[in-house]
Image (spheres, rainbow, N blue to C red):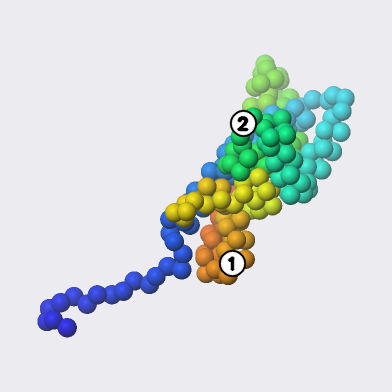
Amino acid sequence: MIAGAVPIVSLPAFPFEPQYVWSIIDVSLYVSGLAIVFSTAVSLPVALLLGFTEFRGKQFLQAIINTGMGFPSVVVGLLVLFAVSNQGPLGGLDLVFTREAMIMSQFVLATPAITAISLAAVSGVEENVRDAAHVLGGTRVDVALVTIKEARYGIATAILAGFGRAISEVGSVLIVGGNIASADGVSKTRTLTTAIQLEARQGRYETAMVLGGILLVIVLLINAVVVRLGEGGVMQ
């Protein structure tokens, strides 16, 4: 070694391609995030409607929502795939094996859970809170906003629970997305769950373990936030 030269320290090689992993994370968060945004936009008004009003068929609608919470994901994937196929009603939009189709499938899976948990939170708001809003001259919109404020922890828990189910989903997104990655290693429709399945099947266990660890961290963070919100709701 030349005197005064700085020794070169070789960095450990990653057992995976960072660009590949980051693209998978990006697709997973993009698809699940948008699915939950759309699902929340639908679920919350439905939960408020069921919580505030009485109408014919209400029990039947609640039964459908509760059934949807346990609906098999592969069946959802098949239904969405048929809807976007050439023979389906959305065939002209060319959505087969796209992120948009994956968002649709996760939307269908997450909406019943978010609706049911949000409904439980809204129904748990005491009647005197709503009565006070009425007495103070509040409109139905004002009463709804007050109720949402009181049930915010439960609603936030519902949204996070829906996101947790969406990002952990494998069956439906595999069917409608196709688990596609480009030749340069960038994910097109490959998510954390579908990539784990592929890497493990092909014997690349190091990459599968890295992806599994990332998914586990995301899910644990979601659960931690849910628990924290639950404790916050109890303390209020």
Name the spot of residue 52 as percent of width and height, x first.
76, 27
Task: Name the residue furthest left.
Answer: 3
Q: Reading the chain from its start, which is encountered first: label 2 or label 1?
A: 2
Is residue 42 visible to us here? no
The quadrant of the picture occupied by the C terminus is top right
Q: Tell me the SS state at disc 1.
A: loop
* Nearest to the observer: residue 153 or residue 169: 169
Q: Position of residue 82 (x, y in %)?
A: 73, 39
Residue type for callout 1:
Gln
The vertical placement of 21 against 131, above or below, is below
Asked which quadrant contains residue 41, the reply is top right
Q: Amino acid at mark 2?
A: Leu
The location of residue 210, given as percent across then percent down, is 52, 64
Q: Is residue 21 left or right of residue 110?
A: left
Rendered residue at 69%/37% (across/down)? 85
Residue under label 2: 93
Whole-percent x and y of residue 73?
73, 49
User: Whole-Å distance between the Cαs marked 2 and 1?
Assistant: 33 Å
Tell me if mark 2 has few (under 14), some (14-19) or many (20+) residues whose alpha carbon lies within 10 angstroms of its own.
few
Nearer to me, 166 or 203: 203
Residue 66 in view of the camera: yes
- Vertical order, 182 against 66 (above or below): below
Question: Which disc is residue 108 wearing?
Answer: none
The crowd level at tag 1 (other Cα within 10 Å; few <14, some 14-19, many 20+) is few
Q: Residue drawn 69% across and 35% down?
A: 86
Q: Nearer the viewer, residue 174 or 52?
A: 174
Q: Which residue is mark 1?
A: 202
Question: Which SS class for mark 2?
Answer: helix
How many numbered marks, from 0 up? 2
